[in-house]
Amino acid sequence: MRALKYGAAALACVVSLSALALPAPFYLWQSKLNGSLVCAQNSPGWNWTRFSGPYSNARCGR
């Protein structure tokens, strides 16, 4: 019974902390092959470099 109380308390803490998490920022990425630009939170692949950012929305606008 005691383990159930502690487990429930731990679960409540984890859920409440995850509600406070911030979204990941967006970055403008440039292709090494043709120089095209794309806005994404993570690198689109191995052949891309971070061009600018961070931005708060998916259009890479401030």
Image (tube, rainbow, N blue to C red):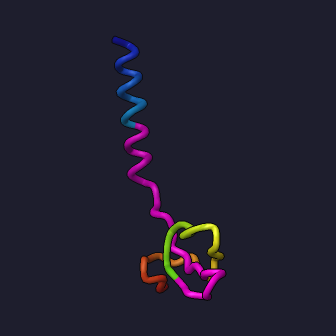
Whether residue 61 sits left or right of residue 33 in the image: it is left
Q: Position of residue 17 (x, y in %)?
A: 44, 46
9 is higher (above) or lower (below) than 41: above
Q: Residue placed at 47% from the left, 86% from the top?
A: 61
Q: Position of residue 5 (x, y in %)?
A: 36, 20
Q: Quadrant of the N terminus?
A: top left
User: Is residue 27 in the magenta section?
Assistant: yes
Considering every residue shown, the one lying at the far front of the view is 33
Whether residue 56 sits left or right of residue 46 in the image: it is left
Q: Position of residue 59 (x, y in %)?
A: 43, 83
Which of 54/48 is in front?
Answer: 48
39 is higher (above) or lower (below) than 45: below
Whether residue 48 sits left or right of residue 24 in the image: it is right
Q: Residue placed at 55% from the left, 76% from the top?
A: 27
Kindly indicate the quadrant of the structure image that contains residue 13. top left
User: Total number of numbered labels?
Assistant: 0
Which of 21/51 is in front?
Answer: 51
Considering every residue shown, the one lying at the far top of the view is 1
Q: Residue placed at 56% from the left, 87% from the top?
A: 36
Q: Position of residue 7 (x, y in %)?
A: 39, 24
Which of 58/36 is in front?
Answer: 36
Q: Which residues are magenta?
A: 13-37
Q: Residue placed at 61% from the left, 87% from the top?
A: 34
Kindly indicate the quadrant of the structure image that contains residue 3. top left
